[in-house]
Amino acid sequence: MRPPLYLLDTTIFCQPIRPAPNTNCQDHWQRHGDDRLAVPAIAVAELEYGLFLKNSGKLWEAYRTILKGRLTVLDFTTETASAFGEMKARQTVTGKTIDDFDLAIAAIAVSHDLIVATLNVRHFKKIEELKWEDWSKR
């Protein structure tokens, strides 16, 4: 098995259980395959938070059947925390701040030398050292 190449942010990770998934995103996911993808534990938390709020048995079943346990999950570690601190300080100085969850996802990607796959380009493009791809495009 090859190591992961992409880290999926929440906008990508949730696509398989959305009522109308983004077809370009689905194409990217299929082309790269599950063994080349990882998901940050933070994206799992964000997705499950949304599921708890919606309180939909149908969505929970889709999540358990389609997504839960499907990809490697990367945790927020001590190494990631150091990367996060440095990135947040740089953003504060430059005035290019984004929310902490997205910054934590970026720190996990940088710590593991992964490319963030996202539909949220507006935030991730503000992080100079981060490699990212917009999966809404072909």
Image: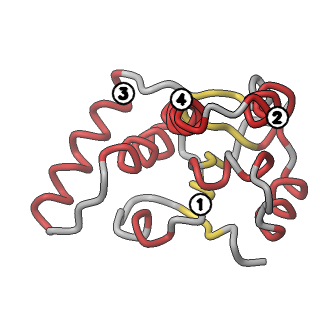
State which tag comes first along the sequence, 3 or 2. Answer: 2
Query: Do residues under tags 3 and 2 come within 8 Å of each other at their CB atoms?
Result: no
State which tag comes first along the sequence, 1 or 4. Answer: 4
State which tag comes first along the sequence, 1 or 2. Answer: 2
Mark 3 or 2, closer to the camera:
2
Residue 123 screen position, x and y as percent:
40, 65
Q: Which mark is residue 41?
A: 4
Q: Residue at x 76, y 23 (%)?
A: 69
State which tag comes first along the sequence, 4 or 2. Answer: 4
> For the residue labelled by badge 3, is the local secondary structure a helix, a strand or a loop?
helix
Residue 6 screen position, x and y as percent:
66, 49
Q: Which mark is residue 62?
A: 2
Q: Amino acid at mark 1?
A: Thr
Measured Cα–Cα span from mark 1 to mark 4: 16 Å
Q: Residue at x 38, y 32 (%)?
A: 80
Mark 1 or 3, closer to the camera:
1
Circle 3 is placed at which residue position? 79
Q: Amino acid at mark 4?
A: Ala
> Which of the 4 image quarters holds residue 37?
top right
Q: Residue at x 40, y 43 (%)?
A: 107
Query: Do residues under tags 1 and 4 come within 8 Å of each other at their CB atoms?
Result: no
Front residue of 133 and 41: 41
From this view, report whether residue 76 is shown above or below residue 7. Answer: above
Q: Which mark is residue 118?
A: 1
Mark 3 Cα-neighbour bin, 10 Å: few <14, some 14–19, many ≥20: few
Q: Amino acid at mark 3?
A: Glu
Residue at the outermost bottom position: 137
> Which of the 4 image quarters holds residue 79?
top left
Q: Amino acid at mark 2?
A: Ala
